[in-house]
Amino acid sequence: MPKTYFIWTIGCQMNSSDSQRVASELERLGYRYIKHYAEADVVVLNTCVVRQSAEDKATGFLWTLKPYKENRPDKVIALMGCLVGVKGGTKLAKAFPHIDVFMPPSDPAPLIDFLLARQGEQADLAFRYQLQDEELPLLLPAHERDRLVAAHVPVVYGCNHVCAYCIIPSRRGRERSRPVGEIVAEIRSLVAQGVREVTLLGQIVDRYGYDVADGPRLPDLLRVVNAIDGLARVRFLTSHPNYMTSELLDALAELPKVCEHIEIPNQSGDEVILQRMKRSYDMATYCRLIEDIRARLPKVSIATDIIVGFPGETEAQFQHSLDYLAQLKLDVCHVAMYSPRDGTVSAKLWPDDVPASEKKRRLDAVNQLQEQIVKEINARLLGQTMEVLVEQKQRNRWQGRTRTNKLVFFEDDTYDWRGKLVNLEITWTGPWSLRGTLPGKTPLVVE
């Protein structure tokens, strides 16, 4: 029987992509995915430390695995991601001696080297590893091949910005852009395995190529990716207001496969808080950018991020964030309560002085406002026909997304729609999803 692996992932889309890369390398070595960590030969934990709650979940799971390792010493436990960071796991090795391998973010090599060196398997596995390496740069797990419709592809690792609240630069290192040829080869391999949509990833994706003298930038990369045969859609995230250039907006307007959806966080609507966050723009600049985006891309949907309870944030300053959300009426607002992280500027300079209960109240207020905003935005789509890329079937309903990243459900038992582009008439709208029907079909019944 083939050896098995299990991967536990928490955190951002970059972590999901990193886990997919680990799975690819394990599949290349002959390992097969299993749903239960207790029976797996290799267990990988891919971690996040952006907030304390994510770190606590990871450490809790590590302790859960300890008795399994004691009962089966040959079981391999690997720790990856921002909990390890780019400096390695020396301190973690003392705290968690049952961990066999520590992997920095986006780097499966330590685990692969460990497995290749075990029990005299090195020669055979190395040969198989090299044999398949050029065929598919990213080999999807067997259970995802010809089933995964949308995938994430990192294009720039790390971050050179030092936002006051963010621990990512110290854990993922400085910016490193991947070569265009490497990115394109990976996307072609994904398309060959059934993927129809890719999302290009970066902590600040707009800064792709900024670390390479006279190198290609994101608009150039988008034009190359847009030309890949078999690929239906292209997205990218996350953007920064300072790098959303006219050239990038031109590419969005011109390239048919690039979707009209932009994630561009502002983090706060208050000028003083923005300065303390070291975001290097003001709200007037952000609002002008939103106006420019909408003027060039009338059908665009825009997402933002907001942090509530940043050190020193008063009720009046929080109200500024609510006021701007009400004014801008964006399609998505990801809201998070501030969590102090050791080593960040904010944790060094200011106490975490907004009570947890007040942070939660502010988070709820943002969500309530945003729910009403999106309900009004989506209501305008009722009766329209929209292109949907179908991703999967759940609870007897097909699920897909519009070009503007709206989640849509529809019913049909006559055809396998997975991976297909379909035009649906929108028959019901809500704040978080839409429902539609195929032309000529009976409209869906609202539950």
Image (cartoon, rainbow, N blue to C red):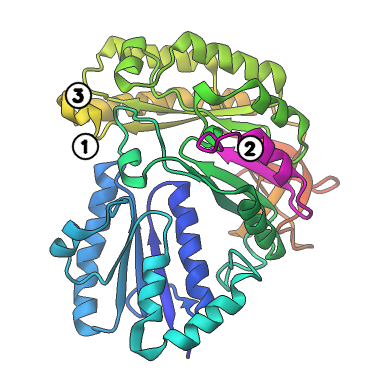
**Mark 3: secondary structure:** loop
Amino acid at circle 2: Pro
Q: Residue at x 76, y 35 (%)?
A: 255
Q: Residue at x 67, y 53 (%)?
A: 184
Q: How far across and how far down the image is residue 325, in percent? A: 47, 18
Crowd class of label 1 (few under 14; some 14 to 19; many from 20; radius 10 Å): few
Q: Residue at x 30, y 51 (%)?
A: 85
Are the residues tagged 1 and 3 within 8 Å (C-beta)? no
Crowd class of label 3 (few under 14; some 14 to 19; many from 20; radius 10 Å): some
Q: Which residue is mark 2?
A: 216
153 to 266, vertically: above or below:
below
* Count of marks, rendered view: 3
Q: Which residue is mark 3?
A: 354
Magenta residues (range):
209-237
23 to 356, vertically: above or below:
below
Which badge, 1 or 2, is on the more N-terminal residue? 2
- Mark 1 or 2: the one toward you: 2
Q: Nearer the viewer, residue 178 or 25?
A: 178
Determine the CA span between mark 1 and mark 2. Answer: 33 Å
Q: How far across and how far down the image is residue 118, in percent? A: 35, 84
* Res 99 quadrant in image: bottom left
**Disc number for residue 355:** none
Q: Is residue 336 magenta?
A: no
355 to 399, vertically: above or below:
above
Amino acid at circle 1: Gly
Determine the CA span between mark 1 and mark 3. Answer: 19 Å
Amino acid at circle 3: Val
| Residue 108 in view in this figure | yes
